[in-house]
Image: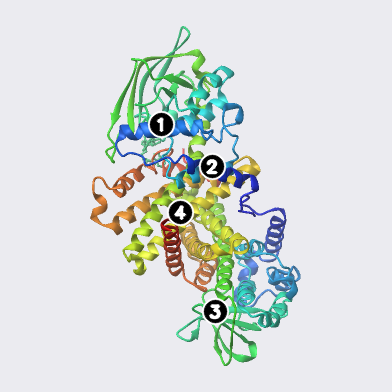
Amino acid sequence: MDLGLTASELAFRDELRDWLRQSPPGPTPLEERASFDHRRAWDQRLHAGGWAGVHWPVEYGGRGATLVESAIYNEELARAAAPPPVNVIGLTLAGPTIMTHGDEAQRARFLPPILSAEEIWCQGFSEPGAGSDLAAVATRAHQVDGGWRITGQKVWTSFAHDAQWCLLLARSDPDAPRHKGLTYFLLDMAQDAVQVRPLRTISDTHELNEVFLEDAFVPDAHVLGGVGNGWRVAMTTLGNERSGLVFGKSFQARILLDRLTALADERGLLEDANVATRLGELHIRVEAVRLTAYRNVTSEMQSGQPGPEGSIIKWIWSETDQAITEYAVQLLGIEALDRDSPWAFELLRARGDTIESGTTEIIKNIVAEQVLGLPRLR
Amino acid sequence: MQFAFNEDQREIQRTARELLGRRAPLERVRAAAEAGAYDERLWDEMVALGWPGLAIGERHGGVGLGLVELVAVVEQVGYALAPSPLLADVCAALVIASGGSPAQQARWLPGIATGELTATIATVRHGAAAPMPDADRAGALVFVDGDRASISSAAAVERDAWASVDLTRRYARVRRAADEPLESDVATGLQRAEVALAAELTGLAQRALDVTVAYVKDRKQFAHPIGAFQGVSHRCAEMLALTETARSATYFAAWTADADPEGLAAASSMAKASAGDAARRVAGMAIQAHGGIGFTWEAGLHWIFKRAHADAAQLTDADEHRRRVARLAAQRLRAASTQVAA
Ligand SMILES: Cc1cc2nc3c(=O)[nH]c(=O)nc-3n(C[C@H](O)[C@H](O)[C@H](O)COP(=O)(O)OP(=O)(O)OC[C@H]3O[C@@H](n4cnc5c(N)ncnc54)[C@H](O)[C@@H]3O)c2cc1C
């Protein structure tokens, strides 16, 4: 057991820290358009500095960072109050999925503009009738000359209003068994047959969309991983989704909790044993998420697979984030519910944590069946 | 960075697991508990393997390994519910090793390391010591009063057997006729002892989880194994999450103790609070998942539940640990903000 960083890990961290000191991200504007522009510009500065997609292999323009280095990277960016990448779907989902399942031409065409944030991606998996039960996807793909025509509806599509490309899961063979009739497409969003409509979320932000497809065209060259192989390709995407983001997020939760603790301390609230007990519990939970994520990194580096602890990280992070924001609002009182208060925003946004990327209930099913080996009813 | 046992540490863990699996199956635990006796042969083997002195320095006749190695063993002792005086023995030794003056260390540690005498520990409230595990056989008794501690020899105390619901260990009420204060870094010793307690608690949680998973795969109701019902399976997933987070915090604290002592105060409190909660809750959930059988003496889940509560009550309780964590976080943040201001 050695939780210290190796010389090369330290060198990686220090180089990044130096770079961040010299080019600090600066505050993210609150207004949505300005915020998007700021974040995209930040993604591009990271790229110019050689700090975009550090976990990508060197041959695709990344740094080939180890899992530990990726964890350090996410912690350091969060520490520097950098905004989350605007091309998060491209960097953590599209890129790795295309690297795993794409052919040479697809890799050459799609990977460089992801890294440089020139092309933003979105993920078109969920539908009105297919959420937790993703294999129920009903959007239909018909083969035509040179490609596919696609008709149907996607929903909860983050970034669709800014995206050039979409990771699209659609049913190419309605007669095949559920999991076998799916194909994974790389869809060009810039066509009239693709209509994006905003959804208003509980935090009153424009984050999510509905996407309507009416004979949208995808050429054969943009089928990813082969016709009828969509489920397998989608599993690669989901695997990256549940593991890729946790370090940055758990560190953001820590920063939020530190801010709350400092506020409570300034106001003398820690003298109250109840307050100290509750805050201490939240610190323990945040730290447990981080430590468990690091244990899982070691499991993955040693065996190539996540350990039993890996599957719980997203779940315990999301519940911890909710607990922090709920307690913050309780402790700070009605002022925290000011429409422009960051605490109110965090309280509301945190409700999405336990729904996006697989709900907590679905994760518990996976833990029960795949980690503990319990039988399933069905 | 490597957040897992290394090869040597895994070997220590494996040895402990195999020995205890053979020597302390649940029937033996029960037989010993009902007889109010320890398995002396098992204790002799533990001594022969050097466990009491695992984390005692070589100059005092110990093995000279660190807290990580000790945690690897103690977790297995908890998993096996081993009827033995090991836990209180190593906790007391950790307090003596940090809290004792050189002379005190030289007086007490060699005997503990070789198993010639056992040691025990309890907290003092309003002048009276809480019931002490294994006090009947102990040659060295450590009393913790706030951030101070003192030690007595067997000759300097009076003891009366005290009946706990936790029969896997024997307890006594102890009155001190004479004791001598430990003069060095008692706080660090206590923090290290809390980590050892957390290790045993993590082992107890894992045992409750394993027993439950096996049972719910097997037991059928409504024509299905009960583990297929989400009310049951999601509970099991929660038991896993509690156990794994307790383990993360405990291993981290053990590593911190030797490699980053500045961080030990916070890490040890996090470990004890989360492992104490995990073991108590997982053991309770295990009883629930077994239904009526879980409530019986025969099923044996109560041994885990009782020992979890007894261990969690040793030294500092979970809520006080949480308050410590909050105060340490506030201190860290104040230090960081004055640094920025300066
Ligand atoms: C902020 C946010 C961003 C998102 N971004 C995207 C995106 O970019 N692209 C995309 O494709 N999707 C996205 N999603 C959609 C997300 O993946 C789905 O909302 C999620 O998978 C749940 O599906 P659903 O909404 O249809 O709910 P349902 O599947 O209908 O679930 C409703 C409730 O039933 C429970 N439930 C369902 N099945 C079971 C079961 N078998 N056992 C126990 N409980 C069950 C669920 O846990 C939930 O509590 C996003 C969602 C959110 C909140």
**Residue A230 horizontal/vertical position (percent):** 50, 24
Q: What residue type is labelled 2?
A: Leu
> Mark 4 — residue?
A286
Residue sitting at the far top: A145
Mark 4 and mark 2 in contact? Answer it, CB < 8 Å. no
Q: Which amino acid does label 3 sit on?
A: Ala
Secondary element at tag 4: helix
**Residue B151 horizontal/vertical position (percent):** 60, 84
> Closer to the N terminus: mark 4 or mark 2?
2
Q: Depth-wise, is mark 3 or mark 1 nearer the camera?
A: 1
Q: Depth-wise, is mark 2 or mark 3 nearer the camera?
A: 2
Q: Depth-wise, is mark 1 or mark 2 nearer the camera?
A: 2
Residue sitting at the far front: B342
Q: Depth-wise, is mark 4 or mark 2 nearer the camera?
A: 2
Query: Disc 4 is attached to a residue of which chain?
Result: A
> Closer to the N terminus: mark 1 or mark 4?
1
Find the distance from the CA under tag 3 to the CA under tag 4: 31 Å
> Mark 2 — residue?
A16
| Residue B34 appears left or right of A343 | right
- Ligand 1 position by quadrant: top left
Find the distance from the CA under tag 4 to the CA under tag 2: 24 Å
What's the mark number on residue A40?
Answer: 1
Mark 3 and mark 1 in contact? Answer it, CB < 8 Å. no
Find the distance from the CA under tag 1 to the CA under tag 2: 19 Å
